[in-house]
Amino acid sequence: MRAITVTPGQADSVRLVHDHPEPPAEEGAVLVEALAVGVCGTDQEIIGGHYGEPVPGTDTLVLGHESLGRVLEDPSGKLEPGDLVAGIVRHPDPVPCPNCAVDEWDMCRNGQYTEHGIKGLPGFARDRWRIEPKYAVRLDPSLGEVGVLLEPTSVVAKAWDHIDRIGARATWEPRTALVTGAGPIGLLAALLAVQHGLTVHVLDRATEGRKPELVRALGATYHNGTVADLDLDPDVLLECTGAPPVVLDAMCEVGPNGIVCLTGVSSGGRTIDFDAGALNRALVLENNVVFGSVNANRRHWELAARALNEADPDWLASMITRRVPVEEYADAYAPTGDDIKVVVDFTR
């Protein structure tokens, strides 16, 4: 069986193994045939040796947390052979903490959770994988290969769920949303903002190519420059770059009673001179909220599946800019300037 593996902590250790063991029964009752895995920045960090934890008792980790597969068997009867599924990435900690105890593993409080392809659980970049039924999300068969976008969409679905919950603190009638960054998360955030009925603006560095085209195809407005240049005062601002100057601009430029959701993760080691007092004043006097969001629980995955079902399938397919056969895996993990979403194809 083929599997794409790394040695966490060892840079550039990614390799394709052709004799990887079949997934053991203890991984889960549902046996799934891999169709595709998506590639994202987390994979790049793991390959660079900056992140990731091996499966306990080994020094290796199978990559891949953005999955798409077809069910081969499920003795529980909850899924049928042939069902299109994605595997939920995070599993609750064994203690469990109060959140994990009620299936809110995305809000784990002690950090002992595990994650497929990232932290202590083998990933989905292998010909076959197993998972328990509660962690397998059935997809509408009409989605086909774009079902591989379910994991990043689940992250955005959680962000919007929490935005709506925070907004309910008072009369909440948002009209305008700004998304910073037009990568996969940013584009999917814009998609859900449009589905929420907001007027949507997207800010990114690209001046031409697929990103502006995809934004405009949503009926949203595409911008370059800085957040401050836009003079929008949006009700909702989703920051999807993790770039420190953009993060600070986002917190400063949201409108009164506004909500800023940070989904991008910044790298450390960089300092910026800014007026913290002015930021504090704006947040307090305008009743603004800034919060971070990462990962998702099953409810968010199901919301994400609904969002994909309601989206234009051609628009979703346009997000996938490269489909790389598994035997050419190295090309998938070598980013190019034109990439939006790269997928490793296990059917080729």
Image (tube, helix red, strand yellow):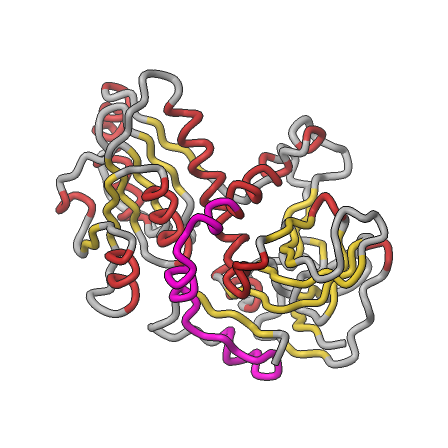
Q: Residue furthest front?
A: 142
Residue at 68% in and 66% down:
62
Q: Quadrant of the C terminus?
A: bottom right
Horizontal and vertical percent for residue 63? 63, 65
Closer-to-camera residue (148/111): 148
Image mark count: 0
Residue at 28% in and 38% down:
198
- Res 338 → quadrant: bottom left
- Res 173 → quadrant: top left
Residue at 19% in and 54% down:
223
Residue at 73% in and 60% down:
71
| Left or right position of 51 against 77 | left
Horizontal and vertical percent for residue 229? 13, 46
- Res 301 → quadrant: top right
Vertical relation: 203 (above or below) 1: above
Closer-to-camera residue (116/73): 73
Tell whether position 329 is magenta: yes
| Left or right position of 260 against 43 | left
Vertical relation: 77 (above or below) 331: above
Q: Quadrant of the N terminus?
A: bottom right
Tell whether position 113 is magenta: no
Range drawn in magenta: 306-333
Vertical relation: 206 (above or below) 98: below
| Left or right position of 135 against 289 | right
Horizontal and vertical percent for residue 306? 50, 45
Horizontal and vertical percent for residue 19? 79, 79
Q: Residue furthest bottom?
A: 327
Dominant secondary-structure state across the stretch colored magenta: helix
